[in-house]
Image (tube, rainbow, N blue to C red):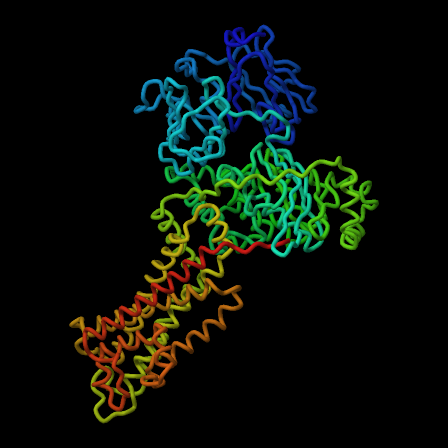
Amino acid sequence: MDDRANTEHPRVVVETEHARTTHSAGKAVRIGRDPQLEVTIVDPVVSREHAQLTWDDGWQLVDSGSKNGIYVDGERREKVPVTSPVRVRLGDATEGPVVRLSIEDPDATRQDVGARWDESTISVGTPSAPTATPHDETPAGSLTVGRSPDNDIVVRDVLASRHHAIVHHVPSGLEIDDLGSVNGTFVGGARVSRAQLTDGDVVTIGNTDFGVREGRLVPRRVVSPTAGGLRVDGVGLTIEGGRRLLEDVTFTAQPGSLTAVIGPSGAGKTTVATIISGSERPTEGVVEFEGRSVHAEYQVLRSRIGMVPQDDVVHRQLTIRQALGYAAELRLPPDTSREDREEVIATVLGELQLSEHADTRVDRLSGGQRKRASVAMELLTGPSLLILDEPTSGLDPALDRQIMATLRRLADSGRVVVIVTHSLSYLEMCDQVLLLAPGGKTAYVGPPDRVGAALGSTDWADIFARVAADPDGVFAAYRATRPSVEVPAPSPPGPLGSPAHTSRRKQLSTVARRQVRLIRADRGYLIFLSLLPFVLGGLAVLVPGDTGFGPSGLDESGELTQILVVLILGAAFMGCSLTIRDLVGERMIYHRERAAGLLPSAYLTAKIVVFCAAAIVQSVIMVAIVFVGKGFPGRGSLIPSGSVELIVDIAVTTCSCVLVGLALSSVARSNEQVMPMLVVTIMVQLVMCGGLITITGRKVLEQLSWLFPSRWGFAASASTVDLRTNATGTEPDTLWQHAASWWLLSIAMLVLISGVLGVVTYARLRLRRSRRAG
């Protein structure tokens, strides 16, 4: 049948729960569970190829020898003619997935602009879209591309902006302009703002690829069976000193497959995962996904690759819905509406069977449910390659099986799923295993039920013992079974680019709102923060004496000095305790969010804003309690009201100590280190403030004290209350002078120290995680 005849026949419309596509005559339209088919329906009752739509003097649906059949009105059929709209169920007469078939009205749906556009480009993706209408501001002879239904080419992709790009017909061919999209428009793997298109070019919008063919923009179709999957060919990694971590790792994984990477500790399993994810470059070999080099075209593929680390990447104080909501705000385009985000979240929760737990706090979920929640974070952007590091670590056998069943379903939906695991209990659920020997040498690649024939045993304990004892021997035996091929040279490094991200302001708002909710959700922590200023203020009131902030006269008990020491100690403790456990406690979450586009500057600024606001409230309460018990100070050094100025002194000191806590949290390696660091920090601040121990005139110690907020906070407070005049017997200190210039110096130094600490913390947040060899 020639092309002209094909265009004369009416097109058939296929509607499923998740997609609406149209097809022309001339080629059979295959329907089934296999992701390589023209119409994919993932359901246990659907066969890999269940039925075909063919043209034979009219469209008809023909059963392809499926196990469970096709049904119309409850009756099983071998053929279903499509002469009018018909509703067909696959696999079950009452509950099977529904396919609606109809004949397209070409006059109503065809978008023909100068015979340049293929009709199949009108809707691309999974959910069905309303019939497109031309964009109001589109120049004649041009088509808009984007997520919104009012585009001429509707890309049903969560990473596409509502109006993503516009394609012009110019005398030399086609030209594409990006419309300021967040995730960018790519041509040939390079991000462009405007580009001339020629035949053979690949245009990428979100996770969707288009090809340019004969002056038309058409959906890019997978040609070979493996082009849409993962290909790891001859991958090796040698680090400084000549140490080999991986050697000639080769395997392929097609869409719909589940691959387990196993082996003894130190065999390089996690290293394989990081190389596949694009986070690290191999020194030998290539990694390709969907026909593209992961490392040469990483900026195009990064959104299609989801990496789930071993540790949970969800805040435990939030519900699953709340955690996914904030993650969606950070990862999806800023023009995504709240309703769109909720729809994406609902879809992900349903796919992972978490809908009934959507409003349950993460810390109340089982280990398996928490792991699925971490997977849900990655599924928000619709990756087609999912990599998991030890997803069943620490789970009992029942939860282990539950997670493996979930991963099996994710693979069956058309994704490539690769897991790094020590668990061997349910490997039969995998399509293949990659067994690595120490030194990153391959011992076996293939289906798990054929490992016995390859290694002479089906007992995994015996296999691991042999692999660990003789890695070179098993590697040589494995290579002997493969044809000798030349290891490909590594792909030339492509631009890493930066992960797409929303605006800094939007990220700051999202992280700040999430931080407030985290504080509110942690009841014990919130109660502690609420009571702390009352306790510390009460301790200051307990200082013996009745002169308060007034002149002490002949009383040399040092009441005023002791009040200020307690206030500064309280400021240091409140500020540090607010933040010292924060960054280290959510480090894994931050690293994953940063890889997905979170800006360190927005993240840190949001933390500073929220915690400084809390610090100011605490400071006001603490000082107010002291005023109630000890009276009010006189005139300030700069501000007429000494009471207001003292509140400023303590608030600025507390905020400076907030930065101290953040800096310490950024260098702490674990939560266990936090408490010793807090105790030492508070003790040092107490000594260096200058009110408890005389440091004036003591060389080295005095200069060292200038590095600590407590020194300048105490100096500002002493200047405000005129400590040199009102406290009899106090060792005079130049910094305590009751003058505006000296007070401003102390406040300026607090701001300077805070700025330096902020820069240090920011630098720590920008550091890339060190590579781990698994």
* Residue projecting furthest to the right: 456
Q: Nearer the viewer, residue 764 or 29?
A: 764
Q: Position of residue 569 (x, y in %)?
A: 36, 76
Tell me which corner region of the image, top left, top right, bottom left or bottom right, holds residue 143.
top left
Q: Is residue 20 visible?
A: no
> Would residue 695 be found to the left or right of residue 587 on screen?
left
Q: Looking at the picture, does residue 171 appear above or below residue 659?
A: above
Q: Position of residue 745 (x, y in %)?
A: 25, 72
Q: Nearer the viewer, residue 49 or 352?
A: 49
Q: Looking at the picture, does residue 264 appear above or below residue 730?
A: above
Name the residue: 34% across, 58% down: 609
Q: Looking at the picture, does residue 755 appear above or below residue 450?
A: below
Q: Nearer the viewer, residue 325 or 117?
A: 117
> Would residue 579 be found to the left or right of residue 52 on screen?
left
Q: Position of residue 288 (x, y in %)?
A: 59, 36
Q: Is residue 503 visible?
A: yes
The quadrant in which the N terminus is found is top right
Q: Nearer the viewer, residue 305 or 32?
A: 305
Tell me which corner region of the image, top left, top right, bottom left or bottom right, holds residue 580.
bottom left
Q: Position of residue 165 (x, y in %)?
A: 39, 29
Name the residue: 49% across, 65% down: 668
Name the residue: 31% across, 87% down: 544
Name the residue: 30% across, 74% down: 713
Q: How many marks?
A: 0
Tell me which corner region of the image, top left, top right, bottom left or bottom right, holds residue 116.
top left
